Image (spheres, grey):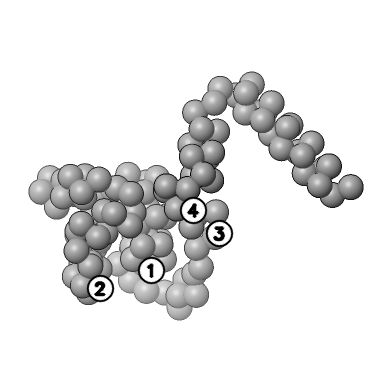
Amino acid sequence: MLISERIYQYLADKKMSQLEFAERTGISQSTVSDWRRKGTNPSADKIMIICEVLDISPYELLSGTESKKHKEYKQPDYVKVDKHSKEYALIETYQNLDPDDKKRLEGYLSALNDLKQQ
């Protein structure tokens, strides 16, 4: 079974519409629809947010089975950032920086953190 088929199964089980799912994940409705129409799977960078919205573990989504070992899976706090928040915008901006600018920003953040701890 394709991952996208599992997603649609979870949507049906949770009585969640495709529109609601798209809004909650920040994934366009046309992309979600393409998964079904074209028989494709979501890209790897979308898996964590999909799992958060569906309240399942990545293991469960990818394997189609629930594991006792993975049943207690909790999303890390950094994954729970609202796509419309300042934090999300900062993360996106950081990811688009060149390596030198990333190092410069990391140094600035480290200096701010050091000041805070004094």
> Which residue is found at the position 21% from the left and 72% from the top?
15
Tell me the crowding category of disc 4: few under 14, some 14 to 19, or many 20 or more residues within 10 angstroms, Cα based: some
> Where residue 26 sits in the image (x, y, percent)?
33, 49
**Do labels 2 and 4 touch, CB within 8 Å?**
no
How far across and how far down the image is residue 85, in percent? 47, 48
- Residue 4, image x and y in percent? 22, 55
Q: Earlier in the sequence, mark 3 or mark 2?
A: 2
Query: Residue lying furthest bottom in this view?
Result: 68
Amino acid type, label 4:
Val
Q: Which mark is residue 77?
A: 3
Three-letter amino acid code at the position of disc 1 = Asp
Would residue 108 be visible to someone looking at this image?
Answer: yes
**Residue highlighted by disc 4:** 81
Could you say whether the residue bearing mark 3 is in a helix, strand or loop? helix
Name the mark nearer the viewer: 1 or 4: 4
> Considering depth in this image, is 3 or 45 the residue closer to the camera?
45
Q: Residue at x 48, y 39 (%)?
A: 89
Q: Earlier in the sequence, mark 1 or mark 3?
A: 1
Do the residues under discs 1 and 2 have CB atoms within 8 angstroms? yes
Which secondary structure, mark 4? loop
Secondary structure found at label 1: loop
Q: Which mark is residue 14?
A: 2
